[in-house]
Amino acid sequence: MPQPRQMTARKAMRMRQFDHSSQGAYFVTIVTNNRLNLFGRVEDEEMKQNEAGTMVAKEYEALEQLFEGMGCLDYVVMPNHFHCLIYLDKDKGITLPEIIAHFKSVTTHKYILGVKANGWQRFDQKLWQRNYWDDIIFNGLQFEMVQRYILLNPSRWNKDAINENHDSDVDHIVKRIKELR
């Protein structure tokens, strides 16, 4: 008789007991469901966004107009994920989860429209993975490393664990950034 499947606890992606409406900078990574390459390709160490990738970038930039006290800082759209630095101002009553939920919702809606109107690649059930990664930026050195990480992300695509075809020697820059807390 088959054994029941063991349920494993999901790894926490966000720091528990942290007020994600607190003033400060946050490094966010959102990954497409099933890690599908939907937003373009990396060619000669540069990201070549397709129309869908351009839409994701525009929707990120539009967030500042929707959420008072929120700043859209550095970002990069990659083939199957999105990195950004978000700044929240003090006492504006918005939270990082609210911002990300809105972003994922509007980009999903617009992506579906692009599938119907422009023949964009279809996705399976959801555009984005259920959750997202965030790191709270605690100091200037960490902030600078994240900015550099975002800037260099396309040139590091072959060493990125999110790339299913990455080289065997994956780098661990994000681990180093977390050590700077």
Image (cartoon, rainbow, N blue to C red):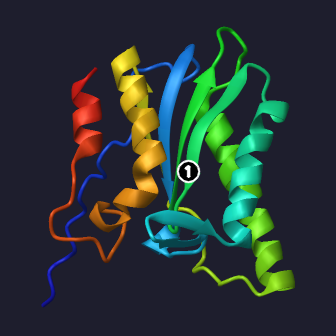
Give the mark count: 1
Q: Is residue 46 left or right of residue 14?
A: right
Location of residue 157 in the rendering, given as x and y in whole percent from the top left corner: 37, 63
Residue 16: tell me if it is visible: no
Q: Is residue 74 visible from the viewing direction of this image?
A: yes
Residue 49, quarter of picture: bottom right
Which residue is outermost to the top? 91
Which residue does the image show at 58% across and 37% down from the upper left?
Answer: 74
| Quadrant in which the N terminus is drawn | bottom left
Q: Nearer the viewer, residue 174 or 153?
A: 153
Q: Nearer the viewer, residue 180 or 33?
A: 180
The location of residue 113, given as percent across then percent down, is: 83, 74
Q: Nearer the viewer, residue 114 or 8?
A: 114
Give the quarter of the image for residue 179: top left
Label 1 sits on residue: 76
Tell me the crowding category of disc 1: few under 14, some 14 to 19, or many 20 or more residues within 10 angstroms, Cα based: many
Residue at x 68%, y 72% (from the top left corner): 50
Could you tell me which secondary element the residue under label 1 belongs to?
strand
Q: Position of residue 120 (x, y in %)?
A: 72, 82
Residue drawn at (35%, 24%), measured in percent from left and top? 142
In the displayed structure image, the side of residue 21 where residue 34 appears, left or right: left
Question: Which residue occupies the extreme bottom position in the image?
Answer: 1
Q: Is residue 20 left or right of residue 171?
A: right
Q: Is 84 situated above or below 163?
A: above
Q: Quadrant of residue 94?
A: top right
Relative to residue 178, is residue 68 depicted above or below? Answer: above
Above-or-below relation of 22 to 114: above
Q: Amino acid at mark 1?
A: Val
- Image quadrant containing the C terminus: top left
Could you tell me which residue is drawn at 25 percent across and 62 percent down?
A: 7
